Image (spheres, rainbow, N blue to C red):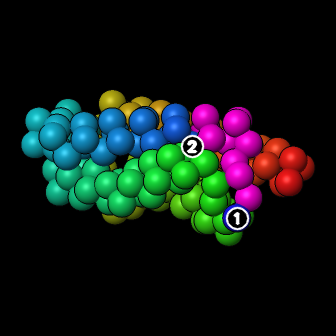
Amino acid sequence: MPALSPFLRKVLLADTVVSGAAGLAMIAGADFTHELLGLPSELLFWAGVALIPFVTMLAMIVWAGRAPTWLIVAIIVTNFAWVAGSLFVAFGPAFAPSLLGQVFIVAQATIVGVFAELQFMGLRRTAATA
């Protein structure tokens, strides 16, 4: 199992912190923000709950300082899947978020997409140092 490059470790730590904060905010704020965002409170709540195992896994990887390449690739793919799902929620036929809801969804999807790209860059750096 290769050691993470310092860059990848920092990116994974940032993803852990941001995803953890977002998850807690969605869980705690689901009943308060659903009307403002135009999204079902259940969607917000369960999206936050879904982040708990992801954040736990990220924290374990950061703490260990190493992970198999396939696991880092899975994290990157998961982040890109989150982006795709978010864009579907924002613009697809299943939901009708308010303009503020669309802005919120696109903003968080952009942040997740940036994390995925930085993780990909960090994976390449980790492979180069191995």
Q: How packed is label 2: few (under 14 Cα within 10 Å), some, or many (20 or more)?
A: many
Task: Report whether 110 appears left or right of 117.
Answer: left
In this view, the mark in front (1 or 2): 1
Q: Residue at x 30, y 45 (%)?
A: 23
Give the residue at mark 2: 12
Q: Label 1 belongs to which residue?
A: 1
Q: Was residue 62 drawn as part of the magenta stretch in this picture? A: no
SS state under label 1:
loop
Q: Amino acid at mark 2?
A: Leu
Q: Front-most of 1 and 124? A: 1
Furthest toward the right, the residue is 128
Measured as percent of width and height from the top left, residue 118 is found at 69, 40
Looking at the image, tell me whether mark 1 or mark 2 is earlier in sequence order.
1
Point out the residue furthest to the left here.
Answer: 31
Q: Which residues are magenta?
A: 2-11
- Name the residue at 46% across, 53% down: 60
Q: Quadrant of the C terminus?
A: bottom right
Q: Can residue 87 be seen in this snapshot?
A: no
